[in-house]
Image (cartoon, rainbow, N blue to C red):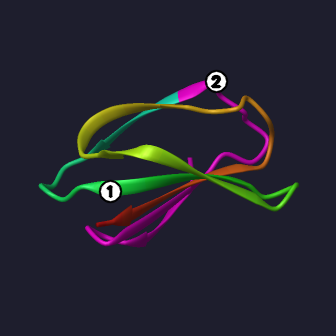
């Protein structure tokens, strides 16, 4: 899946035409991240309540054109 950003600061993953129901991410550093689910078609952002680090699972809406943004906190 395409990913951009600044390592250890900010990541943006884009799913485009391949809408998974979930994705397991692995961020190999000691920082914690806030995660947002971005619906690029409907132009909405859903900020998840938890913070994440290491390996973790994010449930996705299973729609096309979804992006996941991770911001270091």
Q: Quadrant of the C terminus?
A: bottom left
Considering every residue shown, the one lying at the far front of the view is: 49
Asked if marks 2 and 1 touch (Cβ < 8 Å), the reply is no
Quarter-of-image position of residue 42: bottom right
Quarter-of-image position of residue 31: bottom left
Q: Label 2 vs label 1: CA separation?
A: 21 Å
Q: Residue at x 75, y 48 (%)?
A: 16
Q: Which residue is mark 1?
A: 33
Mark earlier in primary sequence (2, 1): 2
Considering every residue shown, the one lying at the far right of the view is: 42
Q: Position of residue 43 (x, y in %)?
A: 82, 62
Q: Residue at x 78, y 49 (%)?
A: 65
Q: Which residue is mark 2?
A: 21
Q: Position of residue 27 (x, y in %)?
A: 27, 49
- Magenta segment: 1-22
Q: Residue at x 62, y 33 (%)?
A: 60
Q: Nearer the viewer, residue 51 or 4?
A: 51
């Amino acid at each position: 899946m395409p990913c951009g950003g600044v390592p250890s600061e900010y990541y943006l993953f884009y799913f485009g035409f391949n809408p998974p129901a979930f994705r397991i991410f692995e961020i190999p550093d000691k920082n914690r991240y806030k995660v947002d689910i971005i619906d690029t078609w409907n132009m909405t952002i859903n900020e998840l309540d938890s913070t994440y680090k290491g390996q973790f699972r994010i449930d996705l809406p299973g729609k096309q054109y979804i992006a996941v943004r991770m911001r270091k906190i």
